[in-house]
Amino acid sequence: MGPLQIKELLQQTPDGQSVTLKGWVRTKRESKNAIFIALNDGSTIHNIQAVAAPGQFSAELLLTVTTGSCLKITGQLVESQGSGQAVEVKIDDLHVYGVADPEAYPLQPKRHSLEFLREIAHLRPRTNTFSAILRIRHTLAFAVHKYYNDRGFFYLHTPIITASDAEGAGEMFRVTTLDLEKLPRTEEGAINFKEDFFGREANLTVSGQLEGELGAMALSKIYTFGPTFRAENSNTTRHLAEFWMIEPEMAFFELEDNMDLAEDFIKYVIGYALEHCKDDLAFLENRLAEEDKNKPQNERSIPLLEKLKFVVENAFERLTYTEAIDILLKSKPHKEKKFQFPVGWGIDLSSEHERYLVEKHFKKPVILTNYPREIKSFYMKLDDDGKTVRAMDVLFPGIGEIIGGSQREDNYEKLLERVHEVGIDPETIWWYLETRKFGTAPHSGFGLGFERLVLFVTGMSNIRDVIPFPRYPKSAEF
């Protein structure tokens, strides 16, 4: 199974036992009594210190031991003489796997800006910040699968290439094998997609929801967890062109059940990270506190662990969209014209409105329900008033909407009417409509953008920093 990782070695009781370390050098310092090498292999935020005696190795070999070089060290695990760690390794043998020229290696032991690190995304996982983020990302992904598996859900793989647009947003990446220099044309001069690979237009998926619903109408409870794509030309700290989505769909769940599941699920995965990522979260909390020192008091964020515990320990506030609009209309920022965007019944709430409700008014996460039908997708179940739909959005401090979902329209005639209303050709989703003809049932679901969750849990401020290789307008490097 390979050598013991540094995480495991740091937990051993030192007894002079022989150990082998493999990892990358974070720092090397020399004193007249010893040479200290801090080694990290990515298994933990903590380095292990390896110590050699002066003159034990040739000056030529030691010149190749620099920040970023990769080593294999054999030695004895002993009690540490210095502070900061319980154990260290007394080096017997040192082998350099790969050198890292200090003149060329961009990650020297100093503070680098996040903007600079985005330009070297192939190396940024070697920094403390990004190794911590990626370990937390893994833990959250594992917690998602564990949560649904333990509750009788089935993991459904929905297609990445699709001919349907689940959101009706139209901002999709086209998938084609046509020669762009010699596009085949119809007699009317339009592009002839009959000659394309699938014999029709195809895109990268914006959501696995529609296919997820088909699974739920047979298996009762399913979830998807896969990549989704949006071709919005959006250069913000909250948008990516390629991101991961978690979408549970449940037969026999109505709006209330859907809300209960969303709240329980998000509390579980955040609680799981709190339990299993203590060191990484402590590191990121300190990082955030350091950043906040330079900000005025009113702009400083809640300490990271406090914010996460707060979400896990508090019941989410639940209210209707109409009640929320009322609160916003009576709010001080609205009366003093501090909101950038207008407030009124029928508007799609912007992030500033969502954050006001969560951070200022209720001071806890909020679930908003029953939105106007015009601002929500065609598949949401109409309320009896005909004006609103059984939608629900979960709003979080710092980011606004983190989950969006609804009870789905299970009535064939009503769904068909909405399909016509929003201008979708029923022929393109005949299979989706048919599930309302053959044994229809109440069902619900929601979507959670995984990166938004990672953003919240790590306390980072830019979504490009919580995915290994971000994709956004004019950027598909690495």
Image: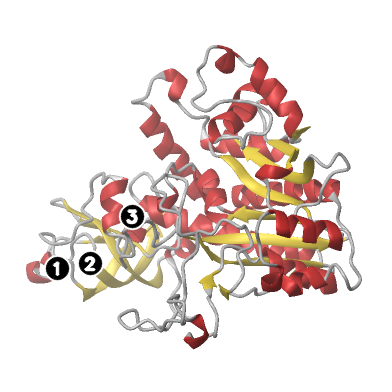
Q: Nearer the viewer, mark 3 or mark 1?
A: 3
Pointer 3 or 1: first along the chain = 1
Cα separation between marks 1 and 2 = 7 Å
Q: Which residue is mark 3?
A: 127
| Residue 16 in view, yes or no | yes
Q: Is residue 147 left or right of residue 460?
A: right
Q: Give, as a three-letter code, the residue at label 3.
A: Thr
Q: Position of residue 167 (x, y in %)?
A: 62, 57
Residue 320 image position (x, y, % from top left): 77, 33
Among the two numbered marks 2 and 3 on one chain, the one whose residue lies closer to the N terminus = 2
Q: What amino acid type should be assigned to the residue bearing mark 1?
A: Thr
Upstream in the sequence, badge 1 or badge 2? Answer: 1
Q: Residue at image x 35%, y 83%? A: 179
Can you give x and y, in whole percent of width and height, for residue 140 in the image? 59, 57
Query: Disc 1 vs disc 2: Cβ atoms closer than 8 Å?
Result: yes
Label ID, residue 69: 2
Q: Residue at x 80, y 51 (%)?
A: 258
